[in-house]
Image: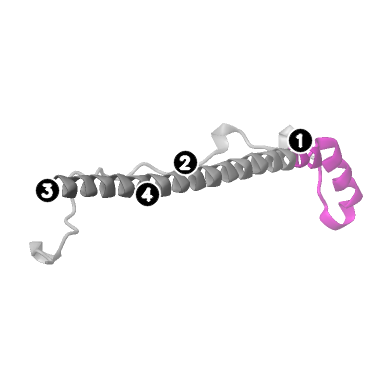
Amino acid sequence: MRTVMYVLTALAVIGLAFWAYRENYATQAALSQTDKLHLEIRQSHARLAVLRAEWAYQNRPDRLRDLAEINFERLQLLPLHPDQFGSVEQVQYPPAPLFPITEGIDVSGANGENPL
């Protein structure tokens, strides 16, 4: 009986060691994948920073003004002046509702019947 317990204990230890070995390699693979993703995210942030800087450079007001002047015949773009805008009093807001809704509307079913 004692021999059977020793054999079962040894098999349990071997089984647990095998499980720990597999979990160790699975964890290392997950950490490696995580490191790759972090690197990809850092590279994406760097590319995004370059694109934002390029966007700011391309949209400089003096550059856009020069482009508008060069392409005036084709685009007919004119510079904006403050007198081209309206005042706040000229904004038309939607009219107030004629009467407030005080009763709920039943949309669950026709004639109060349960649709199920």
Residue named by callout 1: 81
- Label 4: how many residues lie within 10 Å, few (<14), some (14-19) or many (20+)? few
Relative vertical location of residue 91 with respect to residue 115 in this rendering, above or below: above
Amino acid type indicated by mark 3: Met
Residue named by callout 3: 1
- Say which of marks 3 and 2 sits in front: 3
Residue named by callout 2: 93
The stretch of residues the image draws in magenta is: 53-78
The disc, 3 or 4, on the residue closer to the chain's N-terminal end is 3
Amino acid type indicated by mark 2: Tyr
Residue 112 screen position, x and y as percent: 9, 61
Indicate whether residue 56 is drawn in magenta. yes
What's the CA distance linking mark 3 and mark 4?
26 Å
What's the CA distance linking mark 2 and mark 1?
25 Å
Nearest the camera: 7 or 42? 7
User: Looking at the image, can residue 103 be seen?
Assistant: no
Q: Secondary structure at mark 3?
A: loop
Q: Is residue 31 left or right of residue 67?
A: left
Assess whether mark 3 and mark 1 are in contact (beta carbons under 8 angstroms): no
Amino acid type indicated by mark 4: Phe
What's the CA distance linking mark 1 and mark 3?
100 Å
Nearest the camera: 75 or 25? 25
